[in-house]
Amino acid sequence: MSEPNEHARHIVGPWVYLVILLALLLGTALTVWASYVDLGLWNPIIALAIATTKAVLVVLFFMHVWYSSKLTRLTIFSGIFMFLVLISMTLTDYISRAWGSW
Amino acid sequence: MPDSSENAHGAAPAAHEEHPAYLRHHFNSVEQQADASNFAMWLFLLTEVMFFGGLFTAYLVYRNWYYPAFVSGSHQLNVVWGTTNTAVLIFSSFTMAMGVWCAQTRRRRGLVLSLALTFILGLSFLGIKTIEYREKIEKHHVPGFHYSLQSFLDPQSDREVYAEYHDKALVPDMARHTELYFSLYFLMTGMHALHMIIGIGILGFMILRARAGAYTAGHETFVVNFGLYWHFIDIVWIYLFALLYLISRH
């Protein structure tokens, strides 16, 4: 009964989860520390870069996308790419509306 | 003689004997069934990306427009609580991931323990969020008829925050827009908290079922897909923490 069900399913083990947990906690400490330093324009960029790194770690390992099928990976990539298109077009519009008047 | 006679009496009963009860008939294998529901879960999560994405976009646009108001509003948030909650949620994601591993390797007690820890950490997150909300209510920073501009028109009256940031007073027109910051704050953290509450409810249901051995007999799809949902909520919080608490601090 069990033979046809068990093939090729990747099980992510506790050690991977533990390493990712530590990386995420480190990232949190880093981003809180960075927020106290005045870096001007770079503050939000660094905060979002660290947040994105953490999110990618969660997606790839906690959510198993690293081990997923091509179909799943392509779908997730397309969805996030579509979201980035929408957000960047919206922000481009708002940022450029008052172009030259500041 | 492998011929029609063998097929004739072998085919129909075999189709029912050879698969576990949880394999639906329209799937070829458990593997295919798990892939299909996993894929569907991801489609759902992508709609959630769009939903929260809209809120994040609104936040970024208004922050750009009313920058001083959003900075002063952000200074009202307590970074210690925010950081604690981030850590709590990351730990809960870890315990959830361990739950998935326990289900996959058929460890019933480990699964129940992991889910229970996730449940407790989820409740802790909401508890801390309640402390933060209460502070906003006491200061009249909840948008509406009782909204108070005092902290922004006269920052020195708000001693704790002033001691940390030395904010200058905002002009009344800009100070009004702090209400917009708090509207988005409550909308975004509120929607996030609603997802948490739904998740905690499902966790409670799963703990009861896991105790009866439901997910540790080869059919762990529900746990895996719930894990995806829970990790997604964690990711939303990672961005909320960065955007609401951190980027206006220095």
Image (spheres, helix red, strand yellow):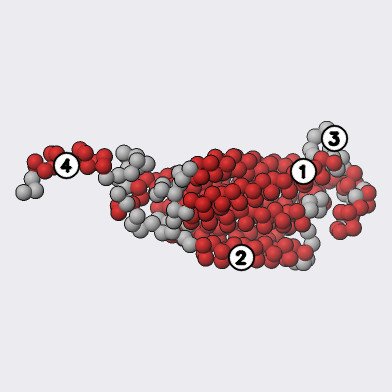
Vertically, is B17 above or below B244? above
Q: Chain of mark 2?
A: A
The residue indicated by pointer 1 is B133
Q: Chain of mark 4?
A: B
Residue type for callout 3: His
Residue B126 image-quadrant placement: top right
Same-chain check, marks 1 and 4: yes
Vertically, is A82 above or below A60? above
Q: Residue at x 82, y 40 (%)?
A: B137
User: Looking at the rendering, in which quadrant would you find the C terminus of chain A?
Assistant: bottom right
CA separation in Å, label 3 and label 1: 15 Å
Contact, CB < 8 Å: mark 1 with mark 4?
no
Q: Position of residue B74 (x, y in %)?
A: 78, 51
The front one of B34 and A55 is B34
CA separation in Å, label 2 and label 4: 54 Å
Element assignment for label 4: helix
What's the mark number on residue B10? 4
What's the mark number on residue B146? 3
Q: Position of residue B157 (x, y in %)?
A: 93, 49
Q: Earlier in the sequence, mark 3 or mark 1?
A: 1
Apparent side of residue B63 relative to residue B196 in the rendered image (left or right): right
Q: Report the mark closest to the observer, 3 or 2.
A: 2
Q: Residue at x 74, y 65 (%)?
A: A33
Same-chain check, marks 3 and 1: yes
Apparent side of residue B219 relative to residue B161 in the rendered image (left or right): left
